[in-house]
Amino acid sequence: MNPDSNRHYSDEDLLEWALDPSSMTPEAEAALQADTELRRSLESWEATVSELRVGFASEEQAEHASERLADSILAQTTREDLSWRGDLRLVSSFVRRGLSRSVWTKLVAASLIIHISALPILGYMLLVETPERHFNIFLEKPVDPPFEENLPEPDREVDSLDPELGDRLPELPGETEEH
Amino acid sequence: MKGSWDEDRDPLSALRAGDAALFEAFVTSEVSTFVAFFARQGADRAEAEDLTQEVFLRLFRSATNYDARDRFSAYAWRVARNAWIDRKRRRVPRGEGGDDELPTGARDVIDPHEGALDGLQRGEEAGRVHAALAKLSESHRLVFELGVLQELPYATISDLLEIPVGTVKSRMFHALRKLREVLGEDPR
């Protein structure tokens, strides 16, 4: 007697057959032929599996960005561009991925862009615009006349003129007074 | 996955042999599969695309050390699962009910280029199945994804998730029973 002939097949077994008919043993096939109830149960599981597969297949067909994504993957694998353009593309895709991951990264990047954009404006303001006029008032230290300190002392009275020298001085008209 | 990528159509074996065409075909064909996978696991649109890109880059970089003993599709799903686990570790916890939240990818599945009615119906259908899927625990959702949507055999799922086949069988049953209940309750 076949040991499988009286075996009770569970719903788990039926589901496995519904998913993968090749997993069914010859004894199981024979049992299915003989038992209508068992066959109906299997058909019910097959219908469920089929409905779910159709439901999810419609979802996969709705993928519209797959072509762009496939191009991006190929550009990084078999069609990798080894020139500087390729490097640029890798860097830009890295930046894009980084930005898409975090709100904080986006904020920091936006702040950086604003600051960098403001630099030329700041430079213009500093270099081109006329500086505001202003006046400084300061008092210089008075400069002493050089002869006060360095002039040699006269060796005789300065107010007594040499009478000979006075005689030799030319007379200017109108300047000589008669006493 | 939409195509078969095992044995003589293994993209990484071909890449090791110097033929990039199969890998390119794999990328072009399966990008949407992985985006949808990550969206169903709970990633938002940008994150799902980012993770998908990461999976393909990891696969490409692993080509030099790739050993074609396993099925390529199982290998690719393992890479995807690891990428998802890594991402979740880095994520900021969204709150206690995070695991039961509606996967945010459900909000982005409507193609703006299609007809308004088509888009609405498709969006409703996708939203309905997403809402049902969101009621599953993460472990059940992953088993469901790999078994029902990716059509991997139980033995491969067991190997990939490092759990016994009996556990895969049990999780799959509970996941589908729950989905059947939820979708059956739907007034549509």
Image (spheres, coloured by chain):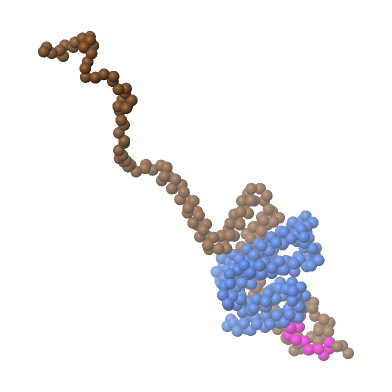
Quadrant showing the C terminus of chain B:
bottom right
In the image, residue A172 sits, relative to residue A97, either above or below, namely: above
In the image, residue A28 sits, relative to residue B68, either above or below, namely: below
Residue at x 30% of width, y 38% of height: A139
Residue stretch in magenta: A4-18
Residue at x 63% of width, y 84% of height: B181
On the image, the x and y values in percent for residue A130 come to 37, 42
Based on the picture, tell me whether residue B68 belongs to the magenta stretch: no
On the image, the x and y values in percent for residue B22 come to 74, 59
Front residue of this view, candidates B79 and B128: B79
Based on the picture, tell me whether residue A11 belongs to the magenta stretch: yes
- Specify the quadrant of the image occupied by residue A68: bottom right
Quadrant showing the N terminus of chain B:
bottom right
Please tell me the colour of chain A.
brown
In the image, residue B129 sits, relative to residue B69, either above or below, namely: below
In the displayed image of the protein, which residue is found farthest to the right? A1
For residue B9, side relative to residue A152 (left or right): right
On the image, the x and y values in percent for residue B122 come to 59, 72
For residue A49, side relative to residue A88 (left or right): right
Residue at x 87% of width, y 88% of height: A2
- Specify the quadrant of the image occupied by residue A9: bottom right
Please tell me the colour of chain B.
blue
On the image, the x and y values in percent for residue A140 come to 31, 36
Q: Is residue B131 visible in this depiction of the protein?
A: no
Q: Is residue A164 visible in this depiction of the protein?
A: yes
In the displayed image of the protein, which residue is found farthest to the left? A179
Q: Number of callouts in the render?
A: 0
Residue at x 63% of width, y 49% of height: A85
For residue B7, side relative to residue B24 (left or right): right
